[in-house]
Amino acid sequence: MTAQTDTPGSVTAVYKVSGMSCGHCEGAVSGEISQLPGVNSVKAVAASGEVTVVSAAALDEEAVRAAVDEAGFELVGRA
């Protein structure tokens, strides 16, 4: 598990997501995850399949999984 604190009060987590292949995919995943409570920023990179999420507190992985599923992709786990 990778979780680190970048600034006081924020947590950064990197997730692996399968199926992203373009900018539209990145936007769909980012849009769904950004709606989760406490999320400050989301950066999805299709080329690596990584999604970096900065939030006020650690997120529930099942909530992240549900958001990724809603976008039409699969959360593999933490990077």
Image (tube, rainbow, N blue to C red):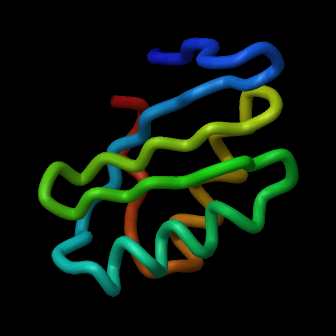
Asked if residue 29 lies left or right of residue 19, the reply is: right
Asked if residue 50 lies left or right of residue 14, the reply is: left
38 above or below 72? above
Q: As drawn, which residue projects farthest toward the bottom?
A: 24
Residue 12 image point, x, y percent = 57, 28
Q: Image point 27% across, 79% down: which residue? A: 23
Residue 62 image point, x, y percent = 67, 47
In terms of image quadrants, where is residue 3? top right
Q: As drawn, which residue projects farthest toward the front?
A: 7
31 above or below 44? below
Q: Image point 22% across, 63% down: which residue? A: 46
Residue 59 image point, x, y percent = 73, 36
Q: How many marks?
A: 0
Asked if residue 74 lies left or right of residue 39, the reply is: left
Q: Image point 74% across, 49% down: which residue? A: 39
36 above or below 56? below
Front-lying residue, 35 or 68 = 35
Front-lying residue, 59 or 7 = 7
Report the quarter where the C terminus lies.
Answer: top left
Q: Image point 81% across, 33% down: which residue? A: 56
Asked if residue 9 lies left or right of residue 58, the reply is: right
74 above or below 77? below
Residue 74 image point, x, y percent = 39, 62
